[in-house]
Image (cartoon, coloured by chain):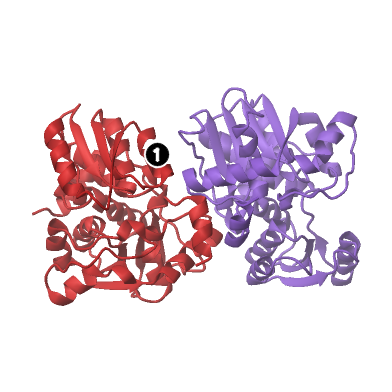
Chain colours: A red, B purple
Amino acid sequence: MIGADDVRAAARVLDGVAHRTPVITSRTLGEHVVLKPENLQRGGAFKFRGAYNKISSLPRGANVVAFSSGNHAQAVALASSLLGAKATILMPEDAPASKLAATRGYGAEVVSYDRYAGNREAIAASMAEELGAEIVPPYDDPLIVAGQGTAALELLEDAGVVDTLVVPLGGGGLISGCALIAKELGVQRVVGVEPEAGNDWQQSFAAGRIVAIDVPRTIADGLQTHAPGEVTWEIASRLVDEIVTVTDEQIVDAMRFTFERLKLVIEPSGAVGLAAVREGLASGGRIGVIVSGGNVAADRFAQLLRI
Amino acid sequence: MIGADDVRAAARVLDGVAHRTPVITSRTLGEHVVLKPENLQRGGAFKFRGAYNKISSLPRGANVVAFSSGNHAQAVALASSLLGAKATILMPEDAPASKLAATRGYGAEVVSYDRYAGNREAIAASMAEELGAEIVPPYDDPLIVAGQGTAALELLEDAGVVDTLVVPLGGGGLISGCALIAKELGVQRVVGVEPEAGNDWQQSFAAGRIVAIDVPRTIADGLQTHAPGEVTWEIASRLVDEIVTVTDEQIVDAMRFTFERLKLVIEPSGAVGLAAVREGLASGGRIGVIVSGGNVAADRFAQLLRI
């Protein structure tokens, strides 16, 4: 069981290592909306916070294994290189070349697998055993959760306490950590936002237990989880007040908005919270929004504008 | 004749009004390169600095007239609304709808003209006379030049003095102001960057006098000037060390780089300095680069990626 103090402890670990991303407002959104642009975080997403917090708890020189086709891979690779850990990342063989290159660029070894034939958890587990390595999971881990929560801690320290905090929701690592600290600091409502096509959390909340769905088809590739995690469900089911969903079209509208008005690049998964606010799905007093990442290729962005 | 103290005076005028944009570095570019992202400035470009500095020198409630199809229009409109001036902006009738809307959104009156039939300077002059208004020129004015120079002053204050300062070059307002303060603070080389198709400054430097060219065809729409200004030529011909040029393709490469690596949107004109550094055209010690603006529509960006 972790709490707000674990988030504070993670903040001390990350101090001077993670970027303290700014808080920003936009006249168009209204001064009551405060954004926390984690696209400007090291590695391009909030994922660095949790990965660094986790890996820093291991002995120096440790072997770590992670499985991810996206931001978590880059985060583990970057955190490992900073902490002197040796990272092996299991990535699907059809992952974008740019993400493979970025992960290798941080010094990690990349092992490919066939995502249609292999079970990545099983492959990672046997690889970890063989290497004597620790698995760094993408979200379902107390130190990962605590690290991600530092995004909300910084937002509330720098912008003051908000009434409503809006957070993208995939595996639940980000929202769990954010809710732990936000509720202690007096935030009244924590709202999670999922892609409409992948509302495993919304269904789980309705059922009062973890519900698994098929892997969803959505442009928000970072939120294509099929069920809440166990650690994250335990926290988020207690502390999150509401789950709302947005469509792919609303996500693209939000990406276009940040591009043209804020001059910031955000990826589809990073845009869902802002999309919900723009659609009036998350309102109430002062609103803080975590914009969780910006790792989208320029050509992919161009393609998304045409959907 | 203006000098570095006029830039310092402008900085006092702009204090708390203009954004103090950050200075940023990128591991990929190398730690010796420091960027000043004026795409994050109010109105999306450095132009706000000069416009505000100029209009603040006029009596409150003054009428002002400006002609521009781009960033200067928005800057004059925004500065006027903040200073209680009444702005009338002459814009070509085929200007992008988004720019017309943004200019009107800041409360300015927009007057259209046929850019193929009318002489905009003459129309603006007669309009100014009729309204009893002051013309706020886009670059060829001491107060405009001094205001733009505050971008370099902030960069050098926040990042320390660099050896080389690289600045986009259109009418010359930005580089003139930047060179005035940079040379006084010990910067050794100031390098101006033009689009290859519109090298009126390079030709003027070679000839030792102002040379006019046809309006150039380049994607850098903010740099489509056909000759140096008189005020700006007097300053830049003394203080600028070298003029280099970049191609449209190199500009798009730089825009793609900032999109994917820095998560920042920059417009073609804003990218020329960075493009020059990436191409090795402006080197020497620590390098400061002014990234001058970010006003590009998402759809236009998508279109540019395909050139």
Question: Considering depth in this image, is B168 or A306 the residue closer to the camera?
Answer: A306
Looking at the image, which is closer to me, B70 or B215? Answer: B215
Instruction: Please provide percent x and percent y for residue A304.
Output: 49, 62
Q: Is residue A120 above or below residue A190?
A: above
The residue at the point 42 percent across, 66 percent down is: A251
Coordinates of residue A165 in the picture (x, y in percent)? 30, 65
Q: Answer yes or no: is residue B66 visible.
A: yes
Residue located at (78% from left, 46% from top): B171
- Under mark 1, the amino acid is Ala
Establish if A267 lies above or below B1.
below
Query: Residue B232 at what x, y percent from top left?
Result: 80, 41
Letter of the chain that mark 1 sits on in the rendering: A
Q: Is residue B70 left or right of residue B113?
A: left
Q: Residue furthest left?
A: A1
Residue annotated with mark 1: A102
Name the residue rendered at 38%, 71% in the picture.
A276
Q: Nearer the viewer, residue B130 or A192?
A: A192
Q: Is residue B134 left or right of residue B47?
A: right
**Number of numbered discs visible in the structure rendering:** 1
Instruction: Name the quadrant of the N terminus of chain B.
Output: top right
List x then y, in percent, for residue B142. Answer: 78, 46
Secondary element type, mark 1: helix
Quadrant housing residue A33:
bottom left
**Residue A92 falls left or right of residue B306:** left
Q: Residue A66 sits in which quadrant?
A: top left
Label 1 Cα neighbours within 10 Å, binned few <14 / some 14-19 / many ≥20: some
Residue A14 visible in image: no
| Residue occupying the far front of the picture | A117
Q: Residue A10 appears in which quarter of the rendering?
A: top left
